[in-house]
């Protein structure tokens, strides 16, 4: 339930940002009057909806609610890991919200270089946004581990594999995909942090890097 509560709050914030986008487009760019602020709203809307609404809502919220019930279990297999996974979501949300208030990133929710590099986005709020996504990604990883372990234990207790409900199969497959993809995204964001703060050139063409590398990793 707590996952769903935080996700609904994030959804309200993301929906409010989408209304700001509509108002700005409907007024011909006169409502906000600042292109940087508009790009910030677009970036924040995308990140909020994907990382703080969709993933916590369906994996954490409905996954933790429906999976034990369908497998005949009292709770998830790793309840303490589940608690840690949830606690990381509001921490990441607070970090991201603070980054919005300070100045925010305006490079789009995909965070493509070179717009995310320090030459174009020098504010520390961009680093805070990347850090918040690291925390949110770690939360998703821990939740996915819990879902896979719960599914394996529940399938062994419940009999044959063909009796497992389709929703449980969908959650387990999605969790495996998250386990495979989130570390790659985290590596790309870490490389971005190194480019911004430690003079590396993974994505900076001026130093021999390639912005396309980030797109492939993303």
Image (tube, grey):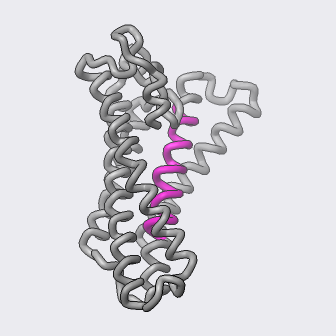
Q: Nearer the viewer, residue 113 or 155?
A: 155
Q: Quadrant of residue 158 in the image?
A: bottom left
Residue stretch in magenta: 40-61
Residue under the image location 37 percent in, 50 percent down: 137
Q: Nearer the viewer, residue 188 or 23?
A: 188
Q: Tell me the chief SS of the magenta region.
A: helix
Q: Is residue 129 magenta?
A: no
Residue 23 falls left or right of residue 115? right
Residue under the image location 46 percent in, 88 percent down: 160
Q: Quadrant of residue 178 in the image?
A: bottom left
Q: Is residue 45 magenta?
A: yes
User: Where does residue 55 sit, x and y in percent of width and height?
Assistant: 48, 58
User: Where does residue 56 sit, x and y in percent of width and height?
Assistant: 45, 61
Q: Nearer the viewer, residue 138 or 89?
A: 138
Residue under the image location 51 percent in, 73 percent down: 169
User: Where does residue 119 sit, x and y in percent of width and height?
Assistant: 39, 14
Name the quarter where the N terminus is drawn.
bottom left
Residue under the image location 40 percent in, 52 percent down: 180
> Relative to residue 9, is residue 33 depicted above or below?
above
User: Where does residue 112 sit, x and y in percent of width and height?
Assistant: 48, 28
Q: In the image as oriented, which residue stretches furthest toward the top?
A: 206
> Relative to residue 141, is residue 198 depicted above or below?
above
Instruction: Please give the count of numbered marks on the rendered protein.
Output: 0
């Amino acid at each position: 339930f707590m996952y769903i509560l935080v996700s609904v709050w994030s959804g309200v914030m993301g929906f409010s940002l989408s209304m700001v986008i509509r108002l700005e487009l409907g007024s011909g760019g006169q409502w906000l009057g600042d292109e940087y602020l508009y790009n910030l709203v677009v970036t924040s809307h995308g990140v909020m909806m994907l990382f703080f609404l969709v993933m916590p809502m369906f994996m954490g919220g409905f996954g933790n609610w429906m999976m034990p019930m369908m497998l005949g279990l009292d709770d998830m297999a790793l309840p303490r890991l589940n608690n840690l996974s949830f606690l990381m979501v509001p921490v990441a949300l607070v970090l991201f919200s603070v980054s919005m208030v300070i100045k925010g990133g305006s490079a789009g929710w995909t965070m493509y270089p070179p717009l995310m590099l320090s030459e174009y986005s020098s504010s520390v709020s961009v680093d805070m946004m990347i850090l918040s996504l690291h925390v949110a990604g770690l939360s998703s990883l821990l939740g996915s581990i819990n879902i896979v372990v719960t599914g394996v234990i529940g399938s062994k207790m419940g009999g044959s594999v063909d009796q497992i409900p389709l929703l449980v199969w969908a959650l387990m497959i999605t969790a495996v995909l998250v386990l495979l993809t989130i570390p790659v995204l985290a590596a790309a964001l870490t490389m971005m942090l190194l480019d911004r703060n430690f003079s590396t050139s993974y994505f900076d063409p001026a130093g021999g890097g390639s912005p396309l590398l980030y797109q492939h990793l993303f």
